[in-house]
């Protein structure tokens, strides 16, 4: 006779109690850890955006620093200093009023053919040829001009718009601050090269004394910097771009400075930029006018302290639905499973409760009938 197979029996009440002891704590802890995981993933993504923007900000600052170094090397070239010193000797016996009158006389004829001999001497000198050689070796340099102490152009790669530079914004800054001054203009557009550029003014100093004797102006193409930033895009909705500290977009895919577009992201990060904690955190969440919530990372380039016209801020942004989509889907699935488990536990509990009540009713009926039978 075959042996009966072993059977494992457990009452529904014990099964329900065991499930309550197991599922309820697991559900509570699962929900708690799910919330913690969502928070940590959010912090990780925010830290990632902070890293992107700080790296891009460092690259931007380094790009400007390298261009200033290149202008410094040009301004300290011995042959250039000698040419500027020689040009300054022509003013030794002239008063300021005579120098000003000469400047006005030449500038009044600068656009016409009367200035052709002077323009030719400026563009064909040995120093001008050396400047063009510098431009050939460094394509980022669009134009270079050298002026003496009075602001008169000594040599240039191209004909400057004005012969005397004393009325230019950068000249006043260089002349007043001497050897500690380097002036960088706001972003501009060059029609001839069809490039956005910044103008770097660097002082030419007298050997030994360090006295201001002239200046070098270099127009620098910023297209390589913009190309680098445009390559730092994030997925489908993410992008990295450059804005000014007034909210104007300096560079963004499909946007150029001439459009004068205001960044909606700047309005969101403005308050955070004004606090130490906000700058250290480096990211925030913001809901835009279209109702979408974006994760925004930001970093100040730090250029404004030395160059007031370059209050540039790097911003990285991405729609949170895309940034956290996979994690949110997993969290929703886990939450659904926990709710489903609790629902099944509730149904089982209701069934056990109703079944137990039915059994108690069946047991009570015979007890009520026994006295009747005895009386009969």
Image: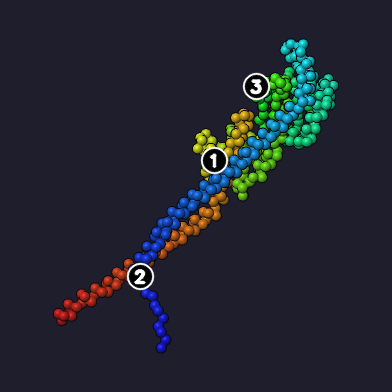
10 Å neighbourhood of mark 3: few (<14), some, or many (≥20)?
few
Q: Cα distance, mark 3 to mark 2?
A: 90 Å
Query: For the residue labelled by badge 3, is the local secondary structure a helix, a strand or a loop?
Result: helix
**Badges 3 and 1: C-beta atoms under 8 Å apart?**
no
In the depicted view, which residue is nearer to us: 340 or 37? 37
Identify the residue shown where x is 39% and y is 59%. Answer: 25
Q: Is residue 88 above or below residue 284?
A: above
* Quarter of the image where one finds residue 211: top right
Check disc 3 and report the residue beneath it: 177
Query: For the residue labelled by badge 2, is the local secondary structure a helix, a strand or a loop?
Result: helix
Residue 107's x, y, as percent?
A: 77, 19
Q: Cα distance, mark 2 to mark 1?
A: 56 Å
Query: Of the residues under marks 3 and 2, which one precedes in the sequence?
Result: 2
Residue 294's x, y, as percent?
A: 55, 45
73 relative to 316 in the view: left or right: right
Check disc 1 and report the residue beneath it: 282
View extreme (front): residue: 208
Query: Of the residues under marks 2 and 1, which one precedes in the sequence?
Result: 2
Check disc 2 and report the residue beneath it: 12
Identify the residue shown where x is 74% and y is 33%. Answer: 141
View extreme (bottom): residue: 1
């Amino acid at each position: 006779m075959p042996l009966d197979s072993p059977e494992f029996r457990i009452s529904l009440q014990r099964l329900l109690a065991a499930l309550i002891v197991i599922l309820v704590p697991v559900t509570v802890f699962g929900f708690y850890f799910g919330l913690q995981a969502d928070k940590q993933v959010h912090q990780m993504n925010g830290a990632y955006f902070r890293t992107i923007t700080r790296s891009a900000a460092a690259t931007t600052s380094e790009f400007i620093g390298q261009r200033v170094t290149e202008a410094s090397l040009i301004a300290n070239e011995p042959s250039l200093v000698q040419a500027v010193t020689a040009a300054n000797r022509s003013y030794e016996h002239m008063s300021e009023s005579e120098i000003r009158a000469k400047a006005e006389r030449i500038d009044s004829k600068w656009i016409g053919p009367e200035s052709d001999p002077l323009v030719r001497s400026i563009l064909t000198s040995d120093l001008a040829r050396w400047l063009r050689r510098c431009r050939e070796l460094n394509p980022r340099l669009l134009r270079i001009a050298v002026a003496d102490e009075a602001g008169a152009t000594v040599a240039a790669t191209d004909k400057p718009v004005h012969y005397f530079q004393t009325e230019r914004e950068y000249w006043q800054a260089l002349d007043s601050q001497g050897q500690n001054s380097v002036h960088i203009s706001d972003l501009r557009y060059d029609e001839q090269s069809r490039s956005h550029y910044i103008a770097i003014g660097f002082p030419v100093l007298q050997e030994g004394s360090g006295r201001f004797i002239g200046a070098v102006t270099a127009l620098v193409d910023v297209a390589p910097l913009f190309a680098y930033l445009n390559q730092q895009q994030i997925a489908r909705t993410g992008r990295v771009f450059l804005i000014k500290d007034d909210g104007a977009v300096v560079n963004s895919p499909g946007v150029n400075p001439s459009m004068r577009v205001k960044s909606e992201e700047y309005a969101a990060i403005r308050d955070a930029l004004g606090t130490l904690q906000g700058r250290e955190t480096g990211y925030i969440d913001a809901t835009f006018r279209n109702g979408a919530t974006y994760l925004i990372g930001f970093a100040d380039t730090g250029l404004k302290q030395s160059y007031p016209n370059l209050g540039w801020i790097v911003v990285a942004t991405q729609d949170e639905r895309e940034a956290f989509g996979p994690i949110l889907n997993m969290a929703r699935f886990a939450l659904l499973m926990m709710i489903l488990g609790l629902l099944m536990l509730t149904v089982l509990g209701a069934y056990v409760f109703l079944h137990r009540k039915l059994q108690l009713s069946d047991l009570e009926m015979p007890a009520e009938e026994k006295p009747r039978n005895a009386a009969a």
